[in-house]
């Protein structure tokens, strides 16, 4: 079965410290993974996608198939990074639905 | 604002009543999705349209739920005989056609069933 697990509901870090938001998945096949972010009073929006291998707002995420993980990392957290972060997995065989984790609320302490 | 819009933003209803929500996707996006989000959870997929065709439905979509997209533009989600367990945020998203991966979300409709 497809499943996305985000073990931390809350994560607090100090400004300038590294941050890592954990995501593990279960999937039979070649997964397609995303990170979505929701800033306060804003809509859910795409942050990054594993296939593109980009760095967005200083965040990167590497797909580790051996560990079935897709952790989100940033070397130096900024206050504006405070938000709710959701890891998401695309459905089987490129289906159009997304499976979301329960989310991690990141708070960056000034 | 050319983003996804949803109406109403908030709905309070009594158990047993029917409710209908509307979603207007980004113009020319032919794919439209409905999700439900309860407190402390991530969004859960409900159903997906490509143009006017409803192509995927989750097992979460019981027979009390029905969704339409009659002209391939806006969509409606109706819940009949609402139950307290239906209280949630209902999110709509849209995306362009084949090969597009990003889903653009609306602000959601928060339903409270009393």
Image (cartoon, helix red, strand yellow):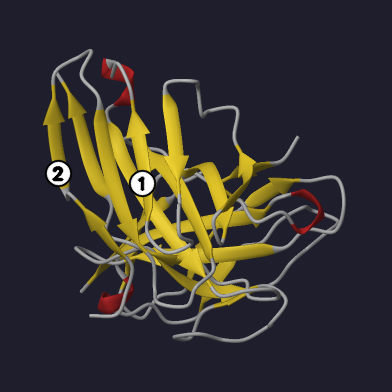
How far across and how far down the image is residue A32, in percent?
Answer: 72, 63
- Mark 1 Cα shell of 10 Å, populated few (<14), some (14-19), many (≥20): some
Which residue is drawn at the image coordinates 50% and 22% (left, top)? B62
How far across and how far down the image is residue A40, in percent?
Answer: 22, 64
Left or right, B59 with reference to B110: right
Left or right, A107 with reference to B93: left
- In terms of secondary structure, where does tag 2 sit? strand
Subunit of label 1: B
Q: Residue A55's image quarter?
A: bottom right
The residue beneath circle 1 is B76
Question: Which mark sits nearer the N-terminus, 1 or 2?
Answer: 2
Q: Residue B100's image quarter?
A: bottom right
The residue beneath circle 2 is B10
Residue B12 is marked as none
How far across and how far down the image is residue B59, in percent?
Answer: 60, 27
Is residue A102 depicted above or below B23 in this figure?
above
Which residue is drawn at the image coordinates 49% and 73% (left, top)? B29
Subunit of label 2: B
Left or right, B40 with reference to B18: right
- Residues behind callouts 1 and 2 on a single chain: yes
Q: Quadrant of the C terminus of chain A?
A: bottom left
- In terms of secondary structure, where does tag 1 sit? strand
Mark 1 vs 2: CB contact within 8 A = no
């Amino acid at each position: 079965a497809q499943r996305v697990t985000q073990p931390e509901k809350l994560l607090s870090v100090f400004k300038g410290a590294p941050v890592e938001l954990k995501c593990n998945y279960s999937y039979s096949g070649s997964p397609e993974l995303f990170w979505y972010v929701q800033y306060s009073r804003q809509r859910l929006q795409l942050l990054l996608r594993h296939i593109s291998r980009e760095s967005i707002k200083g965040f990167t995420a590497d797909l580790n198939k051996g560990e079935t993980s897709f952790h989100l990392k940033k070397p130096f957290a900024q206050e504006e990074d405070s938000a709710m972060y959701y890891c998401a997995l695309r459905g089987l065989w490129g289906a159009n639905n997304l499976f979301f984790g329960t989310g991690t609320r990141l708070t960056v302490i000034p | 604002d050319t983003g996804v819009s949803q109406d109403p933003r908030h709905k309070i209803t009594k158990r047993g009543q029917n409710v209908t929500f509307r979603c207007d996707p980004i113009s020319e996006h032919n794919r439209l999705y409905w999700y439900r989000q309860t407190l402390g959870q991530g969004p859960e997929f409900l159903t997906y349209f490509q143009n006017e065709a409803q192509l995927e439905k989750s097992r979460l979509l019981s027979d009390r739920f029905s969704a339409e997209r009659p002209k391939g533009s806006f969509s409606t989600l109706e819940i009949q005989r609402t139950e307290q367990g239906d209280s949630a945020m209902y999110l709509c998203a849209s995306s362009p056609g084949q090969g597009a991966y990003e889903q653009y979300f609306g602000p959601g409709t928060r339903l409270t069933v009393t």
